[in-house]
Amino acid sequence: MCCKGFLKVMMFVFNGVIFLAGAAILAVGIWVTVDRVSLLGFLDHIEDAPPELAQLANIGYLLIGVGAFLTLMGFLGCCGAVKESKCMLLSFFVIVLIIFLIEVAAAVVLIVFEPLVQKFLDDIGQKVAKSIEDNYGDGDSFTSVWNTTMKELKCCGYNNYTDFTDSRFVNTTSLYPDTCCNSSSGRCSETAALQAGIKGCFQALLKLIEDNAVLLAGVALGIAALEIAAMVVSMILYKNVGK
């Protein structure tokens, strides 16, 4: 009886974490959807964008769906443990198992098709660089998004400062964005941008991911362990209901 009570507590804790994670993702999804123009407005200015890139504009709705799903799943698991409902416990086990298998399949696909992913990113890079050349300094929302991105990541353009060379901003002011030069450089001319050698935002993003690779791997393993533990506990409770 004591063991059963402990399992119920653990089940409640696991699903409480899942519920809170779902609520957080749901909140982020709502924020991204409401503030889509400032966060993802640059996507509207990329010509001939592939369908995969265009779908990024709907990421807010995807986050809302995932967050709502996780919230409901956590609630389902908690109710199943408290009420000792075989139906709820079995449903929870099946849902978590499906999610776990999808995650494993996604990881395998990402590893196997890494060269294709790299080629896709290279193609996207060319289109993003062209959108900077065509729209930076011409639209307030587009320019503001890139200024914020470059300031946060301490980068310049998608590839480097040359992305801005033929933009309206450079043609009008003969200057480059301040983030393309060192703070001590003064006016950011082409020569100053060249000497500064500020890396592009794509490389900065990759560097950020590499620097936090251990943390990301730890989070991924933690989520996998949580899912396995939740499945084990739910199945043990399922078998002991009524005994």
Image (tube, rainbow, N blue to C red):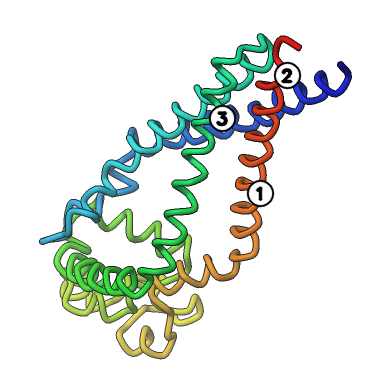
Mark nearer the N terminus (2 vs 3): 3
Residue 176 location, x and y as percent? 30, 75
Judge left or right: residue 8 versus residue 189.
right
**Image height check: is 8 above or below 49?**
above
Q: Alpha carbon of mark 2 to alpha carbon of mark 3: how far?
A: 15 Å
Residue 214 location, x and y as percent? 64, 64
Front one among 241 and 189: 241
Name the residue carrying label 3: 93
Q: Residue at x 19, y 68 (%)?
A: 127
Q: Amino acid at mark 3?
A: Phe
Q: Quadrant of residue 2?
A: top right
Q: Residue at x 47, y 38 (%)?
A: 98
Q: Alpha carbon of mark 1 to alpha carbon of mark 2: how far?
A: 27 Å
Front one among 96 and 145: 96
What mark, if any, has residue 240 been given in the picture?
Answer: 2
SS type, badge 2: helix
**Image height check: is 220 above or below 94?**
below
Judge left or right: residue 222 versus residue 43.
right
Mark nearer the N terminus (3 vs 1): 3
Q: Amino acid at mark 2?
A: Asn
Q: Alpha carbon of mark 3 to alpha carbon of mark 1: how far?
A: 18 Å
Q: Quadrant of residue 118?
A: bottom left
What mark, if any, has residue 222 been given in the picture?
Answer: 1
What mark, if any, has residue 18 been given in the picture?
Answer: none
Q: Residue at x 27, y 69 (%)?
A: 120
